[in-house]
Amino acid sequence: MPIDFSLSPEQRAVRQRARDLARDVLTAARDATHRLATPEQRFVASRSYYRALVQAGLLRRLIPPPLGGEMTGLVDLAIEPRSSWPSRPACRCPYSPPDSA
């Protein structure tokens, strides 16, 4: 019996929310922090974007309901970061070194 790997309508909605969040927040975070030289500068400059991610409910969707979150399953847990972090990351880790170019 074959396994159906297609996403449910709810999972497609999770994927679209994550993509929208990446487009709206992570792209702006990348633009604001990309050329900053030190981890401390990138961290300070990225605080408002972290706040936007929290306000959008990103962290709640990664925490199980018994612990106060809204996670609905492991597939959703995998969809969220994968859809938020495209193959060309929209923002860099605040602690990664700047590009040499």
Image (cartoon, helix red, strand yellow):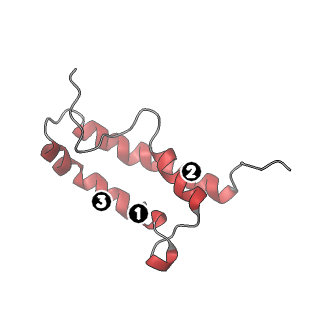
Q: Are marks 2 and 1 in contact (CB under 8 Å)?
A: no
Q: Residue at x 22, y 20 (%)?
A: 101
- Front position among marks 3 and 1: 1
Q: Could you tell which of marks 2 and 1 lies nearer the N-terminus?
A: 2
**Residue 16, horizontal then vertical, whole percent:** 56, 49
Q: Which residue is mark 1?
A: 59
**In the rendered view, does 30 fall on the left or right side of 6?**
left
Q: Could you tell which of marks 3 and 2 lies nearer the N-terminus?
A: 2
Label 3 is placed on what type of residue? Arg
Q: Residue at x 68, y 51 (%)?
A: 7
**Residue 35, horizontal then vertical, whole percent:** 20, 32
Q: Give the label on residue 15, or none.
A: 2
Q: Residue at x 20, y 23 (%)?
A: 100
Alpha carbon separation for disc pair 2 and 1: 15 Å
Q: Secondary structure at mark 3?
A: helix
**In the rendered view, does 27 fall on the left or right side of 97?**
right
Q: Secondary structure at mark 2?
A: helix
